[in-house]
Image: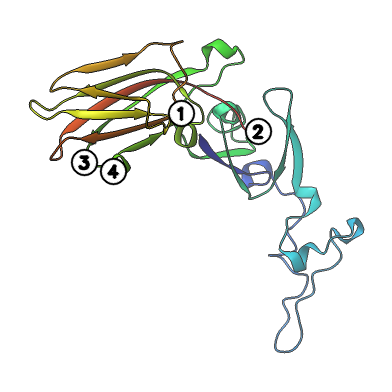
Amino acid sequence: MSVFKVRLQHLTQGQLDLDPTTHPLAAGSGSSPATYGQLGDAFGVDHAASGAASLQRQMFAAGPNRSYRLLKDGETFTDCNYWKRFAFPQVAAEFAFIETVTDDGSIYSDVPGENTYAAGATETLTTAFTGTVIDFVTTHGGPASFLQVQNLDGSITITGELNADTNVTFTLLAGETQIFNSGDLQITLLRLKSASGTPSASWIASIRSTCNS
């Protein structure tokens, strides 16, 4: 999943109302507090005291799956890369209202079948499953529908465990490869360990992007 920041106001687009939390009418000094005015108070919220953005600096935007997300200026959220379509450089800076903070490299298409991307890594194993844990759902936003695991060591046997189930394990001798093809099962978690030492293993997975919106 990627991380985004809401940017409803920036210089390229001009200025909306000044944020009363950072632009008081009078700065104040000593025992005299700053004067913030009444911006937003008509809605029953003292935005200056609470530190919240003005109600004029938030909006609902259409998300995937016929959903809407409330975007508040300055806040961050984690979701699929659907939201990159509102960020620069996918749109011109004067129209962008989303900033991409971190990009997981996944794609988003309005055609669900096209929202599949590859992920993989080479791991250094220990003799305990807790040493190498790949959580597909938490890290990548969805289960793996295809998985390949290869033992890269020339002499040490390794063991894999799927979906945190101690009854669902497989063993790979030196140099062997295990493949779970698309449609075999949904893999939410992969754990790997070695019989001894710290051998290396690689994995490649196919993951379909899912959205929080």
Q: Which residue is mark 3?
A: 127
In terms of secondary structure, where does tag 3 sit? loop
* CA–CA distance in space, label 1 to label 2: 38 Å
View extreme (right): residue: 42
* CA–CA distance in space, label 4 to label 1: 17 Å
Counting from the top left corner in percent of width and height, residue 137 is at 49, 32
In terms of secondary structure, where does tag 4 sit? helix
Given the image, on which type of amino acid does mark 2 rest?
Phe
In terms of secondary structure, where does tag 2 sit? loop
Q: Which mark is residue 95?
A: 2
Residue closest to the eye, 65 or 164: 164
Q: Which mark is residue 131?
A: 4
Q: Are marks 3 and 4 in contact (CB under 8 Å)?
A: yes
* Left or right side of 106 for 86: right
Counting from the top left corner in percent of width and height, residue 21 is at 71, 64
* Left or right side of 64 for 40: right
> Which mark sits nearer the N-terminus, 4 or 2?
2
Q: Which mark is residue 188?
A: 1
Given the image, on which type of amino acid does mark 1 rest?
Thr
Of circles 2 and 3, which is in front? 3
Mark 2 neighbour class, 10 Å CA radius: few under 14, some 14 to 19, many 20 or more: some
- Residue located at (58% from left, 14% from top): 112
* CA–CA distance in space, label 2 to label 3: 52 Å
Position of residue 36 relative to residue 168, above or below, is below
> Which mark sits nearer the N-terminus, 1 or 3?
3
> Which mark sits nearer the N-terminus, 4 or 1?
4
- Residue located at (52% from left, 12% from top): 114
Residue closest to the eye, 32 or 83: 83
In terms of secondary structure, where does tag 1 sit? loop
- Residue located at (35% from left, 38% from top): 133
* CA–CA distance in space, label 3 to label 4: 8 Å
